[in-house]
Amino acid sequence: MYERAQETGTHFGEFRLWIERLPLNERVPFPYGLRDLRYNPEKSVIGIVSGVGTAASIMALGMDRRFDLTRAYWLVAGTAGVNPIEASIGSAAWVEWVVDADLAYEIDAREIPAAWSTGYLPLGKTRPYEEPVEADGTRWVYRLEPGLVAWAYQLTADLETSTTRQSCGKLGRATSASRRLRRRPSCCAATRSAARLSGTVLC
């Protein structure tokens, strides 16, 4: 989603290593997107930096007559937060389930009933944690193809990350989390939201 204007070099961007190591050497003009596309013709892999306006960029790519994406697989690479007790900074994970946390109502906490613990309400509900839960949850819960996720995980299960106890300690996280570093990729579920959560109570 994000990358500096300079796509190669020594900075820690989200797209740089894909360009340099896959590699994605060819640049393809993409006037309706955030920036030009990157392409590997031998592997038939297209790389795109969507920016914050992800929907517009992907729509533009999908409508571009130069590409046939009817049988394409999508790999979304990005950064996320994690409970430091479960994993460390720099851990890698394959996501099988995605929950869209933005699809909700929010009432100002100063105006909610005294008995409520939060002002967040699911769509279609009139109070927090109201039952029953929707049977399928398809409005905000998405599952990637389980077989594809399992295949990707098996390909990378034995790869070790470069995260070390020293790097974790330098970032001020030399706690119990630094003793439980995940050195290999894992599988997980993820919550997708434009909001950034912080604090021991909220998280």
Image (cartoon, grey):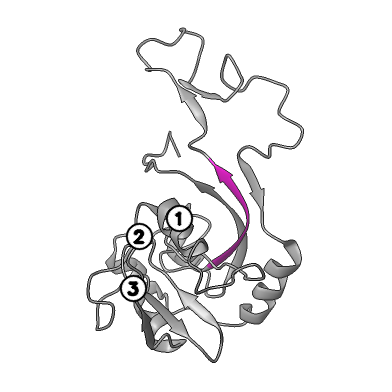
Q: Which residue is mark 3?
A: 36
Mark 3 lies on a secondary structure that is: loop
Reading the chain from its start, which is encountered first: label 1 or label 3?
Answer: 3
Identity, as a three-letter code, of the amino acid under mark 3: Asp
Circles 1 and 3, Cβ within 8 Å, touching? The answer is: no
Q: Quadrant of the C terminus?
A: top left
Q: Which residue is mark 2?
A: 173
Q: Which mark is residue 17?
A: none
Q: Residue at x 50, y 47 (%)?
A: 192
Mark 1 lies on a secondary structure that is: loop
Mark 2 lies on a secondary structure that is: loop
Reading the chain from its start, which is encountered first: label 1 or label 2?
Answer: 1
Task: Please tell me how crowded label 2 is: few (under 14), some (14-19), or many (20+) other residues with Cα within 10 Å.
Answer: some
In three-dimensional space, the C-alpha distance between marks 1 and 3, rounded to whole angstroms, equals 36 Å
Q: Nearer the viewer, mark 2 or mark 3?
A: 3
Q: Which residue is mark 1?
A: 84
Q: Magenta stretch: residue 97 in it? A: yes
Q: Magenta stretch: residue 92 in it? A: no
Residue 29 appears in the rendering = yes
Give residue 188's position: percent from left, percent from top: 61, 58
Give residue 137's position: percent from left, percent from top: 69, 36
Circles 1 and 2, Cβ within 8 Å, touching? The answer is: yes
Q: Residue at x 67, y 58 (%)?
A: 144
Is the stretch drawn in magenta largely helix, strand or loop?
strand
Identity, as a three-letter code, of the amino acid under mark 2: Arg
